[in-house]
Image (spheres, rainbow, N blue to C red):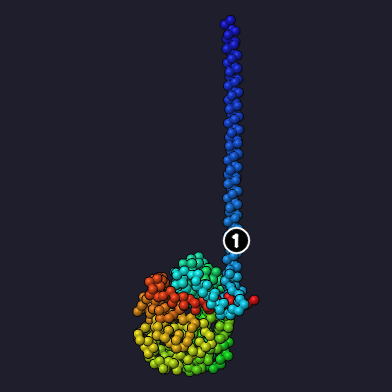
């Protein structure tokens, strides 16, 4: 009996062990299946996430390529404008409506453009600076992120380049093209190409430079002056410039004159004929001309770039000599006139004030007496004739209140900009005054965008 119980217990133990082994096996299988499906789920999730990221990355690449393509198209369109072509982005051009004159259509486009600007953008548009002043870079020979960021913060009206910015044709064209593409607003891109020794572009690129003013004046050949202007204009336009700080409209009134090698003649009438021809040659190439240096510094023997310089000529003497070539250039349709830093006591109550800061000279004589309604630009304000007597903001405010439309190269651009902005905000300079200057500026910049079918 005892053996039977032992056998039954043994059989139960074996059965229980078999059940336990079976349960453990089932548990292991369940756990294995759970791990398998869990890992599979994780793998699927990771794979789905990677696919989503890859799709997002591809979309970003496609959007970037599309943006680059659009930017390239806009850059090409802008360059066509610089080259004098009439092809413009449709949104920036305007067809003539029936019964609407070209002048009326241009005026409407100008007003629309100015009306869309913020006050900060309006003020920035009155400044004409070097690329170094804009970016803070020591020497600018390319336009990259620094230029793009600076033009976004300070959308200036113009940039003035010198020989230091020019290394080769390819480099110059790329720099100017990129600069245009970075600007949300039309830009003046200027250089001082007078011909002769004053030919930074022709010298840097190995071009055949045009004859200088003195050589042309001695030839007494106005056709040669016209052709020289045309050569200069075509060379500048091909590189991407749209403004030349030339020709010089001074009369050589002294053998010791600081303008003796840069003026056409010592005869006002002969100088006037050459100036008129040169303006026509430059501007017919699609590049704007800028006469300089009003009211005339042909009698000066000291250079304003070195310190205060003065002319003791009377107003009557200047009307018969210095003003004559400027009047001829105005009649030839010059787009811009630069007012010099020379002082002219006979023309201004404040005898020691540079011409570019004098309301009597800019508004009283150039605007009212000579009837000039184009753009008036100061000479460089970073020279001793100005900096030794005025802070950058003070000089810029004085120039604009005097009637200048654009301020060229203040010593401290940031200080000048902030000073003018504050002056407009507190009413020292009226916003109407700012918009009046912007209208003159935009009439020149936008006139190529009015076309007929």
Front residue of 151 and 248: 151
**What residue do we see at 58% from left, 73% from top?**
93
Of 278 and 100, nearer the camera is 100
Q: For the point 53% across and 77% down, which residue is it?
A: 107
Q: Nearer the viewer, residue 19 or 367?
A: 367
The residue located at (40%, 73%) in the rendering is 424
Judged from this view, the residue extending furthest toward the right is 453
Task: Give the side of residue 318 with respect to residue 93, left or right.
Answer: left
Vertical arrangement, residue 225 with respect to residue 422, above or below: below
- Residue hosting label 1: 65
Label 1 SS: helix
Give the percent coordinates (x, y) of residue 449: 58, 75
Structural crowding at the residue carrying mark 1, measured as other residues with C-alpha within 10 Å and reported as few (<14), some (14–19) or many (≥20): few
- Camera sees residue 158: yes
Above or below residue 212? Residue 241 is above
Counting from the top left corner in percent of width and height, residue 207 is at 57, 81
């Amino acid at each position: 009996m005892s053996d039977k119980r032992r056998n039954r217990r043994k059989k139960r133990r074996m059965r229980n062990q078999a059940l336990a082994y079976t349960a453990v096996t089932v548990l292991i299988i369940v756990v294995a299946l759970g791990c398998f499906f869990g890992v599979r789920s994780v793998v699927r999730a990771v794979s789905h996430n990677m696919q989503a990221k890859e799709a997002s990355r591809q979309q970003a690449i496609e959007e970037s390529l599309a943006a680059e393509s659009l930017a390239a198209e806009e850059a090409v369109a802008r360059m066509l404008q610089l080259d004098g072509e009439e092809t413009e982005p449709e949104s920036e051009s305007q067809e003539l409506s029936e019964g609407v004159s070209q002048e009326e259509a241009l005026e409407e486009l100008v007003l629309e453009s100015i009306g869309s600007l913020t006050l900060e953008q309006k003020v920035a548009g009155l400044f004409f600076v070097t690329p170094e002043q804009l970016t803070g870079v020591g020497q600018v020979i390319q336009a990259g992120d620094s230029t793009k960021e600076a033009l976004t913060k300070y959308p200036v009206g113009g940039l003035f380049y010198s020989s230091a910015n020019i290394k080769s044709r390819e480099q110059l064209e790329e720099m100017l093209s990129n600069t245009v593409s970075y600007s949300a607003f039309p830009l003046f891109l200027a250089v001082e190409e007078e011909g002769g020794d004053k030919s930074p572009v022709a010298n840097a690129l190995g071009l055949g430079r045009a004859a200088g003013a003195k050589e042309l004046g001695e030839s007494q050949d106005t056709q040669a002056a016209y052709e020289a202007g045309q050569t200069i204009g075509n060379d500048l336009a091909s590189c991407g410039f749209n403004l030349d700080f030339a020709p010089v409209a001074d009369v050589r009134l002294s053998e010791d004159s600081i303008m003796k090698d840069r003026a056409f003649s010592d005869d006002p009438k002969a100088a006037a004929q050459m100036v008129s021809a040169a303006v026509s040659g430059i501007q017919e190439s699609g590049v704007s001309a800028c006469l300089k240096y009003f009211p005339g510094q042909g009698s000066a023997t000291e250079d304003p770039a070195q310190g205060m310089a003065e002319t003791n000529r009377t107003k009557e003497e200047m009307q018969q000599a210095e003003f004559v070539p400027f009047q001829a250039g105005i009649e030839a349709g010059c787009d811009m006139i630069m007012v010099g830093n020379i002082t002219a006591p006979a023309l201004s109550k404040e005898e020691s004030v540079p011409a570019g800061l004098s309301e009597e000279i800019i508004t009283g004589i150039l605007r009212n007496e000579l009837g000039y309604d184009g753009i008036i630009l100061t000479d460089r304000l970073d020279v001793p004739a100005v900096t030794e007597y005025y802070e950058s903001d003070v000089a810029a405010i004085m120039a604009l209140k005097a009637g200048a439309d654009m301020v060229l190269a203040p010593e401290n651009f940031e200080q000048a900009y902030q000073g003018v902005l504050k002056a407009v905000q507190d009413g020292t300079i009226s916003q109407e005054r700012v918009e009046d200057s912007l209208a003159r500026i935009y009439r020149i910049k936008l006139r190529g965008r009015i076309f007929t079918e």
